[in-house]
Image: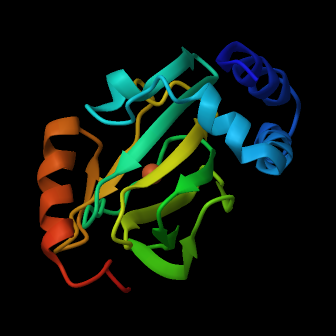
């Protein structure tokens, strides 16, 4: 498989009515030959910020190879659209939140390993963290232009809601990574 074939499959799936479910089905199929997916994405370092990780970007679909270094934890955030994650290596713990009338409520926690798939609807917020002793690498697919969509993020210490802004997000991520665990509410 070449990267353009991977993009074409996800782009075709995302054109349908339930685009998240259709992309999840593509991911389930890809799981049958993860080695081929590894090779197709080998050229992407997976580090250096979103701009270097994105290998396809359009108004209705973004695809990235994402790397969470050991100990890295995000603040709670949403994506402004649906997302589907397929973990390629390492262990990625996800804490999922639903939007409540006031702020967030913890909904569930899951630890994802190679081959695990996590779909998230647009109203889901989450914290992702690398919990193993190697970086967590994953294929992330979003139902919009993730670099431009309006998004929300939450201060990991106060859980105050903010408009997503990259430099503030990074400060929140550093504070989140210092904490014992993802916020429980
Ligand atoms: Fe995320």
Residue at 60 percent across and 49 percent down: it is 122
By what rule are the colours in the image chosen? Answer: rainbow
Q: Is residue 130 left or right of residue 62?
A: left
Most foreground residue, 156 or 86: 86
Q: Is residue 35 left or right of residue 135?
A: right
Q: Is residue 148 visible?
A: yes
Q: How many marks?
A: 0
Percent position (x, y) of residue 3? Answer: 66, 19
Q: Is residue 121 left or right of residue 21?
A: left
- Name the quadrant of the N terminus: top right
Most foreground residue, 49 or 61: 49
Residue 134: which quarter of the image? bottom left
Residue at 39 percent across and 35 percent down: it is 46
As displayed, is residue 159 above or below residue 67? below
- Name the quadrant of the C terminus: bottom left
Residue at 25 percent across and 31 percent down: it is 48
Residue 118: which quarter of the image? bottom right
Residue at 14 percent across and 39 percent down: it is 167
Most foreground residue, 136 or 77: 136
Percent position (x, y) of residue 11? Answer: 75, 21
Q: Is residue 99 visible?
A: no
Residue 87: which quarter of the image? bottom right
As displayed, is residue 157 above or below residue 60? below
Percent position (x, y) of residue 29? Answer: 86, 45
Q: Is residue 8 left or right of residue 145?
A: right
């Amino acid at each position: 498989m070449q990267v353009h074939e991977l993009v074409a499959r996800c782009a075709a799936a995302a054109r349908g009515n339930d685009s998240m479910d259709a992309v999840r089905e593509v991911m389930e199929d890809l799981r049958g030959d993860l080695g081929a997916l590894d090779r197709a994405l080998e050229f992407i370092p997976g580090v250096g910020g979103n701009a270097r990780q994105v290998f396809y970007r359009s108004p209705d679909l973004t695809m990235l190879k994402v790397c969470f270094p050991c100990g890295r934890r995000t603040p709670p955030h949403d994506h402004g659209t649906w997302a589907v994650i397929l973990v390629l290596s390492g262990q990625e713990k996800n804490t999922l939140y639903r939007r409540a009338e006031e702020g967030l409520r913890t909904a569930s926690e899951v630890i994802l390993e190679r081959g695990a798939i996590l779909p998230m609807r647009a109203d889901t917020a989450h914290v992702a963290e690398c919990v193993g002793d190697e970086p967590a690498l994953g294929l992330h697919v979003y139902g919009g232009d993730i670099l431009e969509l309006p998004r929300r993020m939450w201060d990991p210490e106060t859980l105050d809601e903010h408009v997503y802004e990259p430099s503030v997000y990074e400060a929140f991520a550093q504070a989140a990574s210092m904490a014992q665990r993802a916020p429980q509410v």
